[in-house]
């Protein structure tokens, strides 16, 4: 009789991976898939190959949470060099302007940083994953074909000058999802009339996922070898920490698990006991079952009506 090897239980949650340079986000996902022996692995927001830092990698049922994180707030620290621009807007590309002496003053940079703060229309780099007629922009750029991209609205919440050394500028930026920091460097170079490009970039946060909790791929492998992988994983119940929770039991739990729309009890409705319109209606609710495990995320429909559009069965 052939012995049956027991299958490993599925893991669900998020790994905050410290992505190394020269690895694509897809490379990291493939490596995590191999380390954990799990097929269902994804990520919450691509990092350029030359960039390092926070890459939230979703495991198991958590892969379905990407819809809540791809446009979330992100934070970076990086270095830009002034003096010439490149076709990729970073150090991996070919120069697109003649090198000129450049030593921007701190006061001038800070003034431009303030001007870039707020909502603005940003043109993505030609070497990007944006699609043009169904084709990735970088594929067209590599073939020296026209890349007709459309500017998109992004928001820069804060931009800070960290240090200045000749033509090298260290900075920190907090921005909305979809922002290209490479484009920020390129556009600043255009504004100053001397060209600029990124020479380093490290992501320090994506939503609630912070750099201080990030683990390397090597550390993840060690945790698996020590049968302690749970120490590296953010549990499902900890996701969307700003989202209100609703505990359901019995028939209510069964109904939610079947994806049925429900109405909040009068006592749970926002603004009860206060002036009308004072408390905002939450757009999302985390639904916990009788064992206080996350079973669904419900989206607001109207009034006190919610629909569990993400059910974790």
Image (cartoon, helix red, strand yellow):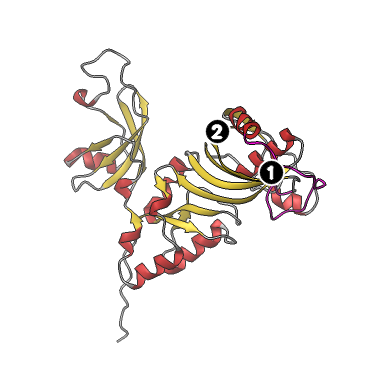
Label 2 sits on a secondary structure element that is strand
Element carrying mark 1: loop
Left-right relation of 21 to 57: right
Which residue is at 30% across, 70% downward? 227
Q: Residues within 10 Å of mark 2 (few under 14, many from 20)?
A: many
Q: Which badge, 1 or 2, is on the more N-terminal residue?
A: 1
| Span of residues in magenta | 87-106
Task: Residue 149 in the image: state x and y as whole percent.
Answer: 71, 38
Alpha carbon separation for disc pair 1 and 2: 17 Å
Reply yes or no: does residue 99 show up in magenta: yes
For label 2, the residue is: 156
- In front: label 1 or label 2: 2
Q: Quadrant of residue 279?
A: top left
Which residue shows up at 25% across the image and 39% down it? 255
Residue nearest the viewer, comparing 131 with 254: 131
Residue count near mark 1 (Cα–Cα under 10 Å), binned few <14, some 14–19, many ≥20: many
* Quarter of the picture holding the N terminus: bottom left
Q: Relative to residue 70, is residue 117 depicted above or below?
A: above
| Residue pictured at 41% horizontal, 48% vertical | 210
* Observer able to see residue 233: yes
Q: Is residue 74 left or right of residue 281?
A: right
């Amino acid at each position: 009789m052939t012995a049956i090897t027991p299958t490993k239980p599925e893991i669900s949650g998020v790994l905050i991976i410290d992505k190394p340079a020269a690895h694509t986000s897809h490379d990291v996902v493939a490596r995590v898939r191999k380390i954990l022996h799990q097929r269902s692995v994804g990520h919450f927001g691509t990092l350029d190959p030359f960039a390092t830092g926070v890459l939230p990698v979703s495991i198991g049922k958590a892969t379905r949470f990407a819809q809540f994180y791809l446009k979330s707030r992100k934070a970076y620290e990086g270095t830009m060099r002034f003096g010439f621009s490149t076709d990729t807007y970073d150090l991996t590309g070919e120069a697109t302007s003649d090198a000129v002496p450049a030593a921007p003053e701190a006061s001038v940079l800070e003034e431009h940083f303030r001007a870039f703060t707020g909502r603005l229309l940003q043109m993505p780099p030609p070497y990007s994953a944006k699609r043009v007629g169904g084709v990735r922009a970088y594929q067209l750029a590599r073939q020296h074909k026209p890349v007709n991209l459309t500017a998109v609205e992004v928001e820069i919440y804060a931009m800070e000058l960290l240090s200045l050394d000749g033509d090298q500028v260290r900075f920190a930026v907090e921005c909305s999802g979809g922002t290209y920091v490479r484009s920020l460097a390129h556009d600043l170079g255009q504004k100053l009339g001397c060209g600029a490009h990124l020479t380093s970039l490290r992501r320090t946060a994506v939503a609630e996922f912070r750099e201080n909790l990030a683990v390397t791929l090597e550390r993840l492998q060690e945790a698996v070898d020590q049968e302690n992988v749970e120490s590296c994983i953010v549990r499902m119940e900890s996701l969307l920490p700003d989202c209100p929770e609703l505990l359901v039991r019995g028939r209510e739990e069964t109904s939610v698990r079947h994806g049925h729309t429900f109405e909040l009890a009068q006592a749970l409705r926002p603004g009860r006991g206060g002036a009308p319109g004072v408390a905002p209606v939450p757009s999302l609710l985390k639904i916990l079952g009788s064992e206080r495990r996350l079973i669904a995320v419900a989206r607001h429909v109207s009034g006190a009506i919610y629909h569990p559009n993400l059910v974790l069965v």
